[in-house]
Amino acid sequence: MALTEKYAPQALPTCLPVVATLDDYLPHIAKLAGITQLTSKIGRKTFATLKIFQGVPQRQVMLATGHTTEKSFNRYLGIDEQELVDIYRRTARRI
């Protein structure tokens, strides 16, 4: 509430100030969310993980994060390739 009241006179479309980079927004977002530590890497990793679990094709998420190989992307997300294979086998349609 304090941040909303602080920036209300500026008539911004959000309760956050206008800043140049994502890293400048993060302290404000962390305060609003009650998070003590928030970095752009955590934000990007969270974005990528959520998009994968929402069903966005991996290649599209890789383009957004700048990864060029599936191996580096999986390592970035903390995904074990064997775990992926096991998940695919369990969820694949049986014909």
Image (cartoon, rainbow, N blue to C red):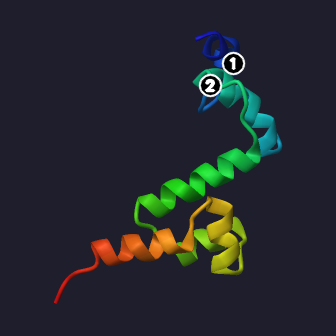
Q: Quick check: can you spot residue 22?
A: yes
Badge 2 or badge 1: first in the primary sequence: 1
Counting other residues with Cα less than 10 Å from the Cα at mark 1, is it few (<14), some (14-19), or many (20 or more)?
some
Front one among 1 and 34: 34
* Element carrying mark 2: loop
Q: Quadrant of the N terminus?
A: top right
Q: Are marks 2 and 1 in contact (CB under 8 Å)?
A: yes
Q: Position of residue 40 (x, y in %)?
A: 75, 46
> Which label sits on residue 57?
none
Residue drawn 62% across the image and 25% down it = 15
Q: Quick check: can you spot residue 18?
A: no
Q: Report which quarter residue 9 is drawn in.
A: top right
* Pointer 1 residue: 7
Residue drawn 57% across the image and 64% down it = 79
* Pointer 2 residue: 15
Q: Position of residue 94 (x, y in %)?
A: 19, 84
- Left or right: where 29 falls relative to 84: right
Residue drawn 62% across the image and 59% down it = 78
Residue drawn 72% across the image and 71% down it = 66
